[in-house]
Image (cartoon, grey):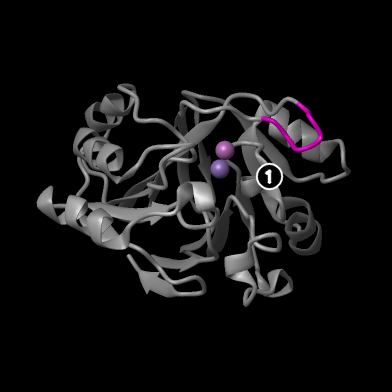
Amino acid sequence: MEVTYYGHSCFLIEMGDYKVLFDPFITPNELAKEIDIEKIEADYILISHAHQDHTADVEAIARRTGATIVSNWEITQYYAGKGIEKVHPMNIGGKWSFEFGIVKVVSAVHSSSFPDGTYGGNPQGFLIESGDKTFYYSGDTALHTDMKLVGQLYNKIDFAFMCIGDNFTMDIADAVIAANWINTGKIIGMHYNTFPYIEIDPVETDLMARNNDKELILLQIGQTINL
Ligand code: NI
Ligand code: MN
């Protein structure tokens, strides 16, 4: 599975013949200046919650590519109201079989509103089964004990995209606990270093992961890896 990092919590993941984009926040991100959103192709855009640092480029990319927006009811209705026709509303606890794989929506402990004040429903995370891989995308969240359910519902989680920047979300110590609860050994870090509030100490972060037998992957912006 090919994974490209576009900074903050934004990843493009190729699943089979489909390109799935998560939480696009690129043009306002000082660290992602090299990325040209006009060149990003997407078949689906998954949105964890409405905050600007997860939705800034949704509208532009959805209009140009015709990608289907997958998110909670409130967020999909917000974009439908802007004339974007291809949306698929979901909510926490539900799953749906898409062309690229099965998406189950799980809870996140956070908040969710658009920059213009529009209510953005409940924040959420995603569990995705595609091909022979199962992975978790945490969205913005605190460590919370519902994550233990993931470990009960799924035999294996191959890797997990998890927020590690602290202040607004989990830090690496919490992410390590979450990784234990969901049964994964591989964490792809997100939601760190974009703003002063979420700067991480790379040495301490790495140590925390290694001391707990977790592989922590921190991608360069623009980097592509195979998972
Ligand atoms: Ni947020
Ligand atoms: Mn955020």
Q: Nearer the viewer, residue 105 or 193?
A: 193
Query: What segment is highlighted magenta in the picture?
Result: 113-118
Is 116 within the magenta? yes
Q: Residue at x 65, y 70 (%)?
A: 40
Left or right of 113: which side holds 129? left
How far across and how far down the image is residue 14, in percent? 49, 64
Q: Is residue 197 magenta?
A: no
Residue at the spot x=71%, y=51% of the render? 56
Give 127 or 177, whichever is nearer the viewer: 177
Which residue is label 1 attached to? 52
Residue type, label 1: Gln
Q: Is residue 112 left or right of residue 141?
A: right
Quadrant position of the N terminus in the picture: bottom left
Q: Residues within 10 Å of mark 1 (few under 14, many from 20)?
A: some
Q: Quadrant of residue 21?
A: bottom right
Q: Position of residue 86 (x, y in %)?
A: 75, 45
Mark 1 element type: helix
Q: Quadrant of ligand 2?
A: top right
